[in-house]
Image (spheres, rainbow, N blue to C red):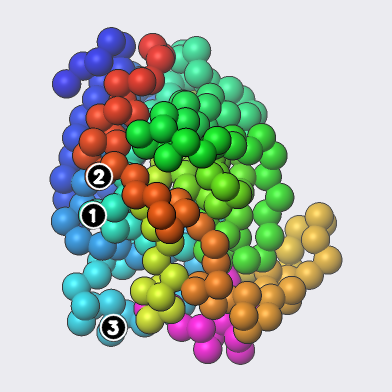
Amino acid sequence: MPLGHWQVSITEGPAGPFHQHVPPAETAPQIWVRRIPRPAIVLGSSQPDALIRHDRAERDGLEVCRRRSGGGLVYIDPETDCWIDVIVPRTSTHWDADVGRAFHWLGDRWAELLADPTIGGGLQPMVHRTSRPSPLGRLWCFADLGHGEVSLAGSKVVGLSQRRTRTWARLQCLAIGAWPGSLLRRYVDLDLLRQQPSAIAGQGPADGHHERTAGDALTVDDVDPTNIVAGPPPDLRLPDPVALAERFVAALPPP
């Protein structure tokens, strides 16, 4: 369904195929609203499958899949979380060759939406203009704040990731209704992380900006997801994902 010059599609189905979908080389500006039928644990592109206790996830009816964008693990709850991909062709006014700055306009739109007292409870959202990756953020996506990502009361509510080619950028947005720390503790092999900290992102030595490997700086308490602070404050409930997606799409400027 068209909205101005954006092509908007609402798709229902498993998370894995959505993450693997690739826009055509010469794509139009698009908004993909994703609705999944069951919760999903989504690994970052370089994280090892061994992080997940697949037997438990399968027994409890969770999908386990991988996204092609980098970064840490994400849990998507279809009852509380809003997943939207924004496809920005190179011809769009929102295109930016800088991979960090490319997120800023989108973060501004999320912040404007969350600034509405009926959504954000009167809290002032903050859009982050820098990125300071940490070992913990390589494990849990919502443990770090990167370019364009949005927080409320210092807690990350909107996470962003990106894939791009020479002709388009796919900006993935996830607004979470709550941080699922206790659930993740059940499905992630914390013993593996304690014994093999480099398994956090499947990496060996870090690049020249860091002196340690991906997990050397982490303690046992650090890797425990119940200790991560993310999502809206406990007394704030975001609109259901369908209503939130509708309001976000309606507020986007022309491409």
Horizontally, is 118 left or right of 72 in the view?
A: left
- The residue under label 2 is 240
Q: Quadrant of the C terminus?
A: top left
Callout 1: 10 Å neighbours few (<14), some, many (20+)?
A: some
Decide if residue 97 is in sight here: yes
Task: Report how far apart the C-alphas of labels 1 and 3 lie in the structure.
Answer: 21 Å
Q: Which mark is residue 79?
A: 1
Magenta residues, as a range?
187-201
Horizontally, is 99 left or right of 231 in the view?
A: right
- The residue under label 3 is 56
Name the dominant secondary structure of the magenta segment: helix
Identify the residue at image location x=42%, y=40%.
Answer: 121
In the figure, 236 relative to 75: above or below?
Answer: above
In the figure, 71 relative to 215: above or below?
Answer: above
Horizontally, is 1 left or right of 229 in the view?
A: left
Identify the residue at image location x=41%, y=32%.
Answer: 117
Task: Report how far apart the C-alphas of labels 1 and 2 lie in the structure.
Answer: 7 Å
Mark closest to the chain's N terminus, 3 or 2: 3
Tag 1 and tag 2, C-beta contact below 8 Å: yes
Callout 2: 10 Å neighbours few (<14), some, many (20+)?
A: some
Task: Report how far apart the C-alphas of labels 3 and 2 lie in the structure.
Answer: 27 Å
Q: Give how far across and how far down residue 65 sits, in percent.
A: 33, 63
